[in-house]
Image: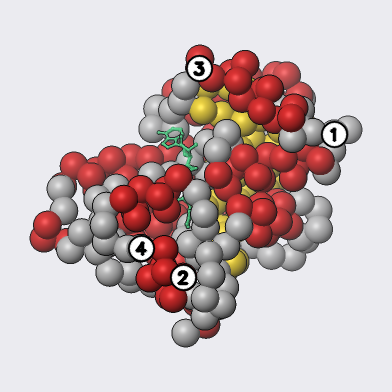
Amino acid sequence: MKKTVIITGGTTGIGKATAILFAKNGYNVIVTSRNANKEAEVLKDFEKNGASVTFFSLDVTNEEQVKTVIEKTVEKFGKLDSIVNNSGISLGNALLADTESDELKQMLETNVMGVYYGMKHAIKAMLKTGGGTIVNLASIAGLNGLVSTAQYNASKHAVVGLTKGAALDYATQGIRVNAVAPGAIKTDILKNAIASGTYDVSGIEALHPMKRLGEVEDIAKGIYFLASDENQFMTGTVLSIDGGYNAK
Ligand code: NAI
């Protein structure tokens, strides 16, 4: 039986590269996006990349919608084997006292509650069908402080906490829970951080010992490894894919 994976926010950036990799490895792939009107465009784009996917619209800050997407997936494909909680936002890079309180609330809603809802309802489904795997998107900002990034730091540290705690909760029940911690990767999120004027590309590159940014495919490969049968004995791990950043 083909395996099935949900990738939240899987229509852009890291999520899109991850969806293509899973599809090429024979998975049923569900990508989600907040914008229901994008379905035709998204499916066409994946086809161009040689990948066939299913599209569900989903705002990860809405628990009911998360639950429904997981139920619809199990209904359509019989089982949910993996979920990649990839949706995330990064707002307002500034020194902490100069940040807007509402930006932290929004990041907690998406980056923390969104991941929590995805984990919670996926685990409920997986427990009924013999297990599965979860991969969450943490960040170098989930393992270390970054200047002018304290709010995002807080949200990604929480992702690490959810990952480790849940890994222990389900370690004997066939559910492996891991995270990846990417360094700076060329996607829209990074463009926004640069647009805020806090960082520029060469400054970000210089933060990484390999002196360059990462590619979305670098992260997709790590996510695929953690989620697939290639990994049998890793749970509660935060895999750094960061050009050496976390070795400093
Ligand atoms: P991206 O902006 O292309 O992807 C984020 C996706 O999340 C988008 O498709 C966006 O529409 C979706 N999203 C945002 N809010 C949502 C909501 N409420 N409901 C559903 N979907 C929502 O950027 P990227 O880089 O691909 O980000 C993917 C993940 O990787 C994020 O969690 C990000 O924090 C994380 N990350 C990215 C790094 C980078 O340098 N690009 C570094 C470390 C972590």
Q: Dots 3 and 2: beta carbons under 8 Å?
A: no
Q: In the displayed structure, would residue 137 be above or below residue 61? A: below
- Asked where in the image residue 178 lies, by quadrant, the reply is bottom right
Mark 4 and mark 2: Cα distance apart in space: 9 Å
Q: Mark 4: which amino acid? A: Asp
Mark 1 and mark 2: Cα distance apart in space: 40 Å
Residue drawn at x 12%, y 57% is: 98
> Can residue 122 be seen in this snapshot?
no
Marks 4 and 2, the one that precedes in the sequence = 4
Marks 3 and 2, the one that precedes in the sequence = 3
- Determine whether the residue tagged by mark 3 lies in a helix, strand or loop: helix
Q: Dots 4 and 1: beta carbons under 8 Å?
A: no
Horizontal side of 146 relative to 231 (left or right) equals left
Which label is found at residue 200?
4
- The residue that disc 3 covers is 36
Q: Mark 1: which amino acid? A: Lys
Marks 1 and 3, the one that precedes in the sequence = 1
Q: Nearer the viewer, residue 186 or 93?
A: 186
Marks 1 and 2, the one that precedes in the sequence = 1
Mark 3 and mark 2: Cα distance apart in space: 35 Å
Q: Within 10 angstroms of label 4, few (less than 14), some, or many (20 or more) residues?
A: some
- The residue that disc 1 covers is 2
Q: Nearer the viewer, residue 235 or 112?
A: 112
Mark 4 and mark 1: Cα distance apart in space: 43 Å
Residue drawn at x 75%, y 42% is: 22
Residue sitting farthest toward the right: 1
Residue drawn at x 68%, y 22% is: 44
> Can residue 50 be seen in this snapshot?
yes
Residue drawn at x 16%, y 47% is: 101
Residue 83: percent from left, percent from top: 62, 41
Q: Nearer the viewer, residue 201 or 55?
A: 201
Marks 4 and 3, the one that precedes in the sequence = 3
